[in-house]
């Protein structure tokens, strides 16, 4: 894993606290709503952040199973899906990612119109850049010489 994602903004909190449970929930630390990641070529991506068990309804998306380590998101697996919620329903690498500490699902959905890099190419570039331990395809030079 050559590089890490760093949070770039603060999450939003809902207003109108009605109970002590609402207050306790609002005071818990939360990850930012979105983060940015660079593909090592020429493109920056915006990722939505979800809990690891989420199955957001997105099409033509790139997703990552990540762990949070010292304030940065570490991609353990990067994939793509035409129908993300369907792909995540029985994902073959999810349990492995959780066993390695994954707690977050990061999702990038390229704009439908005028996307510079489509989701298929974005997946390839991001795997090459971040060398996630659970990916076996498209890995960069660091994976070839011992995961540096």
Image (tube, helix red, strand yellow):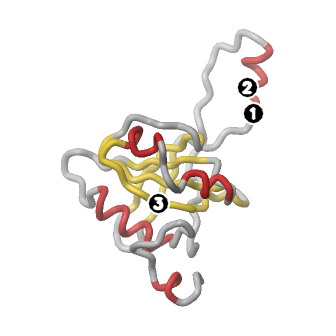
Asked if disc 2 and disc 1 are in contact, CB closer than 8 Å, the reply is: yes
Q: Quadrant of residue 45?
A: bottom left
Q: Position of residue 76 (x, y in %)?
A: 57, 62
Q: Position of residue 130 (x, y in %)?
A: 51, 70
Q: Nearer the viewer, mark 3 or mark 2?
A: 3
Q: Residue furthest left?
A: 113
**Residue visible at 48% across and 44% down?**
90
In the image, is residue 60 above or below residue 147? above
Binning the other alpha carbons within 10 Å of mark 3 as few (below 14), some (14 to 19) or many (20 upward) gives many
Q: Which numbered dot is residue 25? A: 2
Asked if disc 1 and disc 3 are in contact, CB closer than 8 Å, the reply is: no
Q: Quadrant of residue 72?
A: bottom right
**Residue visible at 27% across and 60% down?**
117
* Residue tagged 1: 28
In this picture, residue 96 sits left or right of residue 80: right
Cα gap from disc 2 to disc 1, whole angstroms:
5 Å
Q: Residue furthest top?
A: 18
Asked if disc 3 and disc 2 are in contact, CB closer than 8 Å, the reply is: no
Cα gap from disc 3 to disc 2, whole angstroms:
30 Å
In this picture, residue 29 sits left or right of residue 113: right
The foreground one among 45 and 138 is 138
Cα gap from disc 1 to disc 3, whole angstroms:
28 Å
Q: Which numbered dot is residue 78? A: 3
């Amino acid at each position: 894993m050559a590089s890490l994602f760093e949070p770039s903004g603060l999450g939003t909190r809902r207003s109108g606290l009605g109970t002590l449970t609402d207050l306790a929930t609002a005071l818990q630390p939360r990850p930012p709503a979105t983060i940015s990641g660079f593909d090592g070529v020429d493109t920056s991506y915006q990722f939505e952040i979800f809990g690891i068990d989420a199955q957001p309804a997105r099409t033509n998306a790139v997703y990552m199973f990540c762990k949070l380590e010292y304030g940065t998101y570490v991609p353990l697996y990067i994939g793509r899906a035409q129908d993300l919620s369907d792909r995540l329903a029985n994902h073959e690498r999810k349990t492995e990612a959780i066993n390695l500490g994954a707690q977050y699902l990061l999702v990038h959905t390229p704009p439908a119109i005028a996307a510079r890099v489509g989701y298929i190419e974005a997946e390839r570039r991001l795997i090459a850049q971040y060398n996630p331990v659970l990916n076996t395809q498209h890995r960069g030079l660091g994976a070839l010489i011992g995961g540096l």
